Amino acid sequence: MESNLIVRRNEEMSVMEKLGILSDAAKYDVSCSSSGVGRRGDGTGIGNTLAAGICHSFSADGRCVSLLKILFTNECIYDCKYCVNRKSNDVPRASFTPDEICELTIQFYRRNYIEGLFLSSGILYSPTYTMELIYEAVYKLRTLYRFQGYIHVKAIPGADAEIVRRLGILADRMSVNLELPTAEGLKRLAPNKHRKNILTPMRQIQQGITQNKNEIALYRHAPSFVPAGQSTQMIIGATPESDYQIMMVAESLYRKFDLKRVYYSAFVSVNEDKELPALPGGPPLLREHRLYQADWLLRFYGFEAQELLSEKKPNFNILLDPKADWALRHLELFPVEINRADYRMILRVPGIGVKSAQRILRARQNGSLNFNDLKKIGVTLKRALYFITCSGKMMYPTKMEEDYITRNLIGEKERLPFDRDGMTYRQLSLFDDCGDIFWKG
């Protein structure tokens, strides 16, 4: 009876009505920032995938390329307390058909609105049933419609492993949402979901990627399996985990599953529930920003989670970025002589990024560097000057005292990227005024 009602209600909706519901329902999923893979079209279909990635700014006139970011359905058999699409919520429901997904993607691509598709979903009847529908859509898009652009698909925990494998051959990137940092938090807020079920497809995808690399090494024309890798997402602030716990989980995920990216999504209160925290100050955006900064240190700067935080210091300093905070707690290692220090230590200087550190190593082969040279290289001297010397001299007389340097660093205003790669908590619409999308010609 219920299934007949869902079908009837869905058939009465236009594609544009479904698009309005299912694009809005996808806005809290942030784990789709870029492709990370280069794959040109072979001339037999439309589109390609560029390694530079995909922009997420949606525009009414198509001036900015983007992903079509939608749910296949916002129907769901689960009742996660933090989710706007949970079973017990009285919200408009809709489901696409595989053909509607294909038509939308192709028509948006032809009009230069998008370069690719990000497809997630609620769970309709069962994980395997839903993943079979998603597979049908992606299979048709790749074969019948000859779409060779970027496709990112969410794998649903609990779905049949064979469906996940087949989707991995068609998709550029796959992701499985961890949802919450710990199993305890998941049990509390998402009792229908289990950590083991979430980690199982993550392991399958990781093993499939590794196996595929070996196959390609032996057979040049072997089909690629998730060539852009996999990612995941954690909701931050819905449960009481510390920053230290979150970073330890992220570090473990990078090591065990070879993830391309862990995304941190500040908890947005969309439901009334006694188990959910009150957020008088709104979503914890600054905390999310600090976690992203720390994540960058893990992936590109050689830091480990236990260097940045500990059980005695479990949370990041909101006033300072994690790298500066670490440096201030290890002043015995500074100042660093820029003309002699190794790459690892130069990377740990606040105000020096990966590219600047590499330029320093190349430039000093031609002679000693001074502060003016560092400025030309791209070093942020207003931060670095407290931690470096050039030929034994500091830029200005500086007290190597934590309080003194902290006051000066806090005085420097930090611009916080709350839009997270072009995304905000109010996802922009693909169209301000649409008309009929299924145009001819």
Image (cartoon, rainbow, N blue to C red):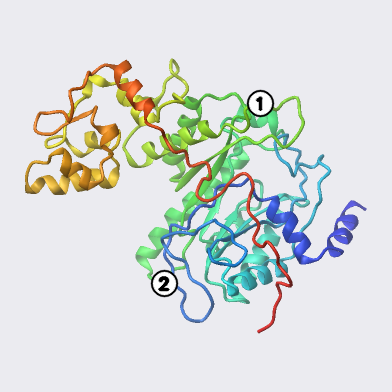
Q: Tell me, for residue 221, which label it has, or none.
A: 2
- Residue drawn 75% across and 24% down? 274
- Residue drawn 62% across and 44% down? 425
Within 10 Å of disc 1 (Cα), the crowding (few <14, some 14-19, many 20+) is: few
Q: How far across and how far down the image is residue 112, in percent?
A: 56, 71
- Residue drawn 34% across and 42% down? 300
Q: How far across and how far down the image is residue 177, in percent?
A: 59, 44
Mark nearest the camera among 2 and 1 is 1
Q: Quadrant of residue 398?
A: top left
Q: Tell me, for residue 280, which label it has, or none.
A: 1
Q: How far across and how far down the image is residue 114, in percent?
A: 57, 66
Q: How far across and how far down the image is residue 153, in percent?
A: 59, 56
Q: Mark yes or no: residue 406 visible.
A: yes
Secondary element under disc 1, as helix, strand or loop, is: loop
In this rendering, would 363 be left or right of 326?
left
Q: CA distance from mark 2 to mark 1?
A: 56 Å
Q: Mark yes or no: residue 129 visible.
A: no
The residue at the far right in this view is 1
Residue type of the residue flagged with mark 1: Pro
Q: Quadrant of residue 252?
A: top left
Secondary element under disc 2, as helix, strand or loop, is: loop
Report the front residue among 136 and 356. 356
Report the front residue among 251 and 389. 389
Report the front residue among 266 and 138. 266
Q: Tell me, for residue 207, which label it has, or none.
A: none
Q: In this figure, what is the number of numbered marks?
A: 2
